[in-house]
Image (cartoon, rainbow, N blue to C red):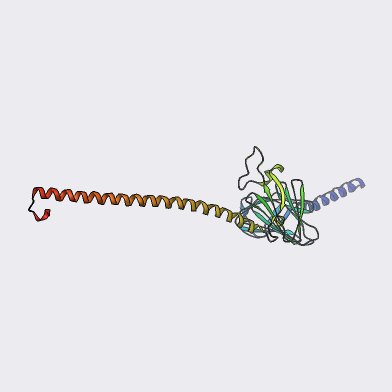
Amino acid sequence: MSGNNFKLRFSLLMLLAVMVSAVPMFAASAVIGSVAGSTNASIGGQALVPHTTLFSGDSLRVDDGAAVVAMGMGSRAVFGRDTVASFERGADDVSVLLGQGNVSIYRPEDGVALRVKVGDVTVSTAKGFKTLGEVAMVNGAVVVTAKEGMLKVEGSGKSTELTKGKSIAIMQQKAEGKPAPQAGTAASHLSQSQWISIVTLAGVGVNTGFSIADYQKAKDAQTTAAEANTNAVQADTDAKAATAAATQADADAKAALAAAQQAAAIATAACQLVSPTDPACL
């Protein structure tokens, strides 16, 4: 074999070896993680089962259930009921694009960095901290709660850091000339102008134990109170109508009794005219 042929074959073999070794590297770069467990959840319309590998671009939907996704190096995300989300793989982090619902994220000190994006709002886990947090879309707001460690929240040109026990709500604002997003609409379609400033809930009279559940309970209580008031007004209206009906019925009964008494008197008088001695007419 000539020297030139040997060099050509050697070069081709080296190129092939590099290409083969690169395939797993590129494939791994798109891997988000794997499913640790789920109930009533699906990816791309297919039922989700444990150990399913998730890739960048996959779309997750959770109905009346939950899904746990392990992101690697101990990091994980738990998706609650009625949640829609998709994933993006970065160079050194994983992003969850939350369309609706809620997600809890956990990152150990050396775990894979996690981000949650809702429109132009980004929630990131802090490096060097064991971090546990919640992000939820609740009644037109993005509610973020830090359970452990620290979360960084950015959006609408603002930035803040949440430490353990703190929560914030970023209220959705209807853009002028545009309809408000309907339930289930992907939040990524929201423009920056649709969000108002970040409000630290602990700074406006809400205790630091505020959570997504508390926020929802407050909203539910407000709705329940409004419904109770409406029902009370309707009950009062119904009671007045019932009283009026009862008064009218009493008047009608009295009129009917008077008419009956008058009819009886007329009948007696007529009987006495025809048969004055008849005992039945007395």
Considering depth in this image, is 18 or 179 the residue closer to the camera?
Answer: 179
- Residue 168 image point, x, y percent: 71, 54
142 sits to left or right of 24: left
Q: Is residue 40 visible?
A: no
From this view, report whether residue 59 is shown above or below residue 108: above
Number of numbered discs overlaid on the protein picture: 0
- Residue 94 image point, x, y percent: 74, 53
- Residue 153 image point, x, y percent: 75, 52
Indicate the quadrant containing the C terminus: top left, top right, bottom left or bottom right: bottom left
The structure residue drawn at horizontal position 12% and vertical position 50%, both measured from the top left corner, is 271
Q: Is residue 279 visible?
A: yes
Q: Seen from this angle, which residue lies furthest left?
A: 277
7 sits to left or right of 202: right
Considering depth in this image, is 143 or 49 the residue closer to the camera?
Answer: 143
- Residue 50 image point, x, y percent: 65, 60
The structure residue drawn at horizontal position 70% and vertical position 46%, both measured from the top left corner, is 196
Q: Seen from this angle, which residue lies furthest right?
A: 3
Considering depth in this image, is 79 or 247 the residue closer to the camera?
Answer: 247
Q: Seen from this angle, which residue lies furthest top?
A: 177
The structure residue drawn at horizontal position 43% and vertical position 51%, both measured from the top left corner, is 238
